[in-house]
Image (cartoon, coloured by chain):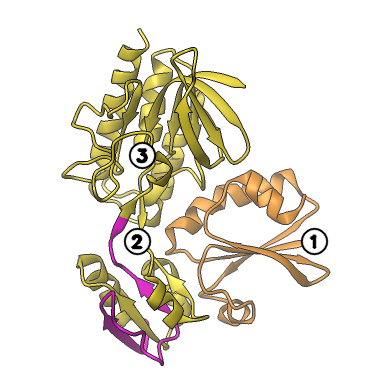
Amino acid sequence: MEVLDFYADWCGPCQMMKPVVEEFKEAHPEVKVRAVNIDEEEELAAEYRVSSIPCLVVLKDGKEVNRSVGVMPLKKLEKLAEV
Amino acid sequence: MKKYDVVIVGAGMAGLTAAIYVARAGKSVLVLEGTMHGGQIINTIKIQNWPGDFEVSGADLMNKIYHQANNLGAEVEYEEVVKISENRGDGGFVVETNENEYACRAVILATGTEPRRLSEKQAADAGSRPISYCATCDGALYKGKPVVVVGSGNTAKHEMKYLEGICSKVHHIHHDDPIPADAEAVFVAIGRVPNTKVLKDFVELDKDGYVVAGEDCKTSRSGVFVAGDCRTKSARQLVTAAGDGAIAAGAVVEYLK
């Protein structure tokens, strides 16, 4: 299980997600969370067709199983990641 | 059913300020939020008109206020309110969400506003192309690509200026024009509308959907108060939302006496 967290420094809602993602990482150390700065990793953002951020993509065995765009509280992120 | 003195609908500046005041007055308070605490201002990276801070981001400011409300005993649940009605029998109210029902003695509505959505015709025209309501959030995803901005107000002009620094071409159209064929994304800035759909048969709304109330924040229904951008008012600013929160909380505490 892996979560890709597409963000950018200039994106306000992404700043809002930062503490939520931190809390998630602490509560679920078994899930790999990878922060992807879309300015630095344009290709990855394009590969996953990210059209709006913050965008969280949940991968299982490397395959996308879920995604969500926009801010959300911890409990919704947990639901998204099915943990 | 869990019971509170006050249920506040919305965890933006108005709702969280009201929660701070109500909690400090010793009343039990639940704040219900459909998406994420913080409200509209979290889209702003640099706030320069919040007294006391030369510059602060919306996210930092709202997270501080959220923790402050929390520390004072206000509870926050992330559930979407779908209906509010009078509780026959005890004179209070029942607030229904997508997950639970809560009973309370008084309600503060602080539901804010949301971007006006693209018309059905234009949305159909846009097809599978991404639609964004925030150029500063999503603009950089269209570096060197043609995009279009829909809208004729100040926000639309501001978004265009921002996108012109990033995109290869920024088309500008009005709310009833066709979407240009080459635009790879559609940025919408056609104003905001109040989040008051579920309140339609509960309190008086004006023709645009704002909750009718004066500076005393009292709605058409006794025991129901309104704060922030969803109220009929002349200035919709962060400080006036906070001001409304304090006024509505004061009125609630008085009502509960």
Using the numbered discs, state the Cα–Cα distance from disc 1 to disc 3 in whole angstroms. Answer: 36 Å
Number of the front mark, 1 or 3:
3
Q: Which residue is mark 3?
A: B13
Residue B6 image-quadrant placement? top left
- Seen as rendered, the residue at the extreme left is B234
**What residue is shown at x 24% (from left), y 37% (from top)?**
B212
Three-letter code for the amino acid on which mark 3 is drawn? Met
Between discs 3 and 2, the one toward the N terminus? 3
Three-letter code for the amino acid on which mark 2 is drawn? Arg
Q: Please name the color used to draw chain B.
A: yellow
| Chain identifier for the orange-coloured part of the image | A
Q: Which residue is mark 2?
A: B116
Query: Which quarter of the rendering shows the C terminus of chain B?
Result: top left
- Seen as rendered, the residue at the extreme right is A61
Rendering coords of residue A46 (x, y %): 59, 81
Q: Which class describes the residues within 10 Å of circle 2: few (<14), some (14-19), or many (20+)?
A: some
Using the numbered discs, state the Cα–Cα distance from disc 3 to disc 2 in whole angstroms. Answer: 20 Å
Three-letter code for the amino acid on which mark 1 is drawn? Met
Rendering coords of residue B115 (x, y %): 36, 59
Dot 1 falls on a residue whose secondary structure is: loop
Q: Nearer the viewer, residue B61 or B98?
A: B98
Using the numbered discs, state the Cα–Cα distance from disc 1 to disc 2 in whole angstroms. Answer: 37 Å
Q: Chain of mark 2?
A: B
Q: Is residue B64 visible?
A: yes
Residue B83 appears left or right of B109:
right
Q: Which class describes the residues within 10 Å of circle 3: few (<14), some (14-19), or many (20+)?
A: many
